[in-house]
Amino acid sequence: MRATIIHAPGDIRVEDRPEPKITAPTDAVIRTVATCVCGSDLWNYRGINPVTKPEPIGHEYVGIVEEVGDDVTHVKPGQFVIGSFIASDNTCPNCRAGYQTNCLHRDFPNGCQAEYIRIPLADGTLVATPDQPSEDLIPSLLTLSDVMGTGWYAARAAEVKPGATAVVVGDGAVGLSGVIAAKELGAERIIAMSRHESRQKLALEFGATDIVAERGEDGVARVKELTNGVGADSVLECVGTPQSMHQALQSTRPGGNVGFVGVPHDVQIDGQELFFSHVGLRGGPAPVRAYLPDLINRVFEGRIDPGKVFDLTLPLDEVAEGYKAMDERRAIKALLRP
Amino acid sequence: MRATIIHAPGDIRVEDRPEPKITAPTDAVIRTVATCVCGSDLWNYRGINPVTKPEPIGHEYVGIVEEVGDDVTHVKPGQFVIGSFIASDNTCPNCRAGYQTNCLHRDFPNGCQAEYIRIPLADGTLVATPDQPSEDLIPSLLTLSDVMGTGWYAARAAEVKPGATAVVVGDGAVGLSGVIAAKELGAERIIAMSRHESRQKLALEFGATDIVAERGEDGVARVKELTNGVGADSVLECVGTPQSMHQALQSTRPGGNVGFVGVPHDVQIDGQELFFSHVGLRGGPAPVRAYLPDLINRVFEGRIDPGKVFDLTLPLDEVAEGYKAMDERRAIKALLRP
């Protein structure tokens, strides 16, 4: 089969690899219908995460179940399924508490930018759609595997409530998904921090009411101006740098909440600053499994259309161009069709 | 009048000072019925906070209203009142959101270890008791001015819910008050971290179900053992050191919450560690004003008796011995009668 291999920073190739097999009775093998490039794949592509040997890459996927292990009972061959980027048994105490990405038995699907993939803990990880989806729904369903679920978690962790004012820091696919989530959870005012015209446009289409192009202290000042000097109720931090975290914390009102989903890189939070802010803070890899049934419904009902974050669609063989376009910020997110 | 003055670290004296006067129409002057020494006063006493000149000290008080400014309408002379250690107007957006210690017009009563005190923003800060309290209720009412309200906030910030498992890190007056709060909010299991016999005893009396004497990694391991390897739902951090914060975060289950009320000293929280923990974190100076009406009722109804944290009662003239006893950990908390 054709599979994407990262050989070194900037060196993405499609190669022939053996098809994956069932290795545990809880596995499933899926024929990939669509996959995509994640902002976090760029860390490897840019050499921020070290790449020491050629490795399969990719963790977002939708597809048709090909084969299941003997213990798998929740999904069956022929079904269209979506799964989380982290596999979970969905039965351990952490899963039952709604934090499947902290499953006591979690596993990490990898190499999903390929024609076939093996998903561990299939019963706990995969959710089948009610029907075979029409072609136009596939991009949106694909986002539920990671970015849309991550934006949703950011909004939940930031405790967005009906009538609230929400700020979204970060205008990548996750930030834009966060705008959708804030709207669906009832935020009345949604301030998107963005300085890129195409992303500003999409943010507005997704429900943002205000765009703030300023960053850092200027961005904070602008948010304060828009919130009677007090700050926002909920801030979704979708970047993961010291600057974006600081900006998020400073933009939140006392008693408000920051949900942070950008994996922090060199971020230290000063205890005393957090203390005197009265701001609540929760982050983490999003438990997208928890949201799949609800979000699948919202996509099928046409309430949300997060698939619009894909502004580039390529055949799998051109995956290298997908990485390049995202790295150069020519594309928000690249969808791949095997 | 007699007032407590700190001259230098370790140097506490009672001196004659002029009685405070109404200086703003929103002020009240109170004749102090009881006051006390706070753990945070010890920072000055120990020279951790610099003491550059002789200064009045103390911020916890109950008393009888002597005189009010022209704009004060909620309290009147002769009433027995309790007030927060931070004065607030109780009408600004932050106050209305329940974060009175972040009031946009906040002020800081000081010099409360004295016969008379001036309280700014009296209408927003002071709450009168329904009747003149009997003598035996006075210690408990005094704790509502700071420590009991702070323990209450720690439990609220840690989102203690009925049936929950709560851990209390810190066995000072605030931590012990946190045990009371966790119990009142319905925690089923309350693990008090303490290695001092008298404090362990009081924690058990207040509702703790388990005592853990170990600290640091050993303490975390013990909490994990008591919670099926997962960690506690809610952890109240009532110390403020890097060690205690680390211990609190590590003792919490994914999706659980840490409420931190020990003012952080040299605490830095690693963004990535917090991220992967899925733990929610909120702290701050407790908005005790928000809890006063409810907590006054609980004291009058005899539901709670936080006054037991006072294991030393002295006349105001012997305040220096109160500081000394607390500094040497001979006393949990010293009550002073002017």
Image (tube, coloured by chain):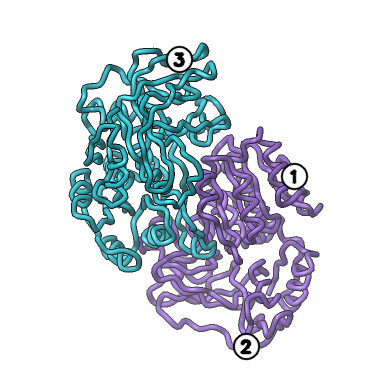
Chain colours: A purple, B cyan
Q: Is residue B186 visible?
A: no
Residue B150 in the image: above or below residue A27: above
Q: How far apart are marks 1 and 2 (CA)?
A: 42 Å
Q: For this rendering, which residue is in front, B190 or A318?
A: B190
Query: The residue marked by circle 1 belongs to what chain?
Result: A
Three-letter amino acid code at the position of disc 2: Lys
Instruction: Tell me the number on the disc at residue A53.
Output: 2
Q: Is residue A183 visible?
A: yes
Q: Distance between the residues labelled 3 and 2?
A: 77 Å
Residue ID for mark 1: A211
Residue B183 in the image, given as x and y percentages of width and height? 27, 43
Residue ID for mark 3: B68
Tag in front: 1 or 3: 3
Query: The residue marked by circle 3 belongs to what chain?
Result: B
The image quadrant of residue A253 is top right
Three-letter amino acid code at the position of disc 1: Ile
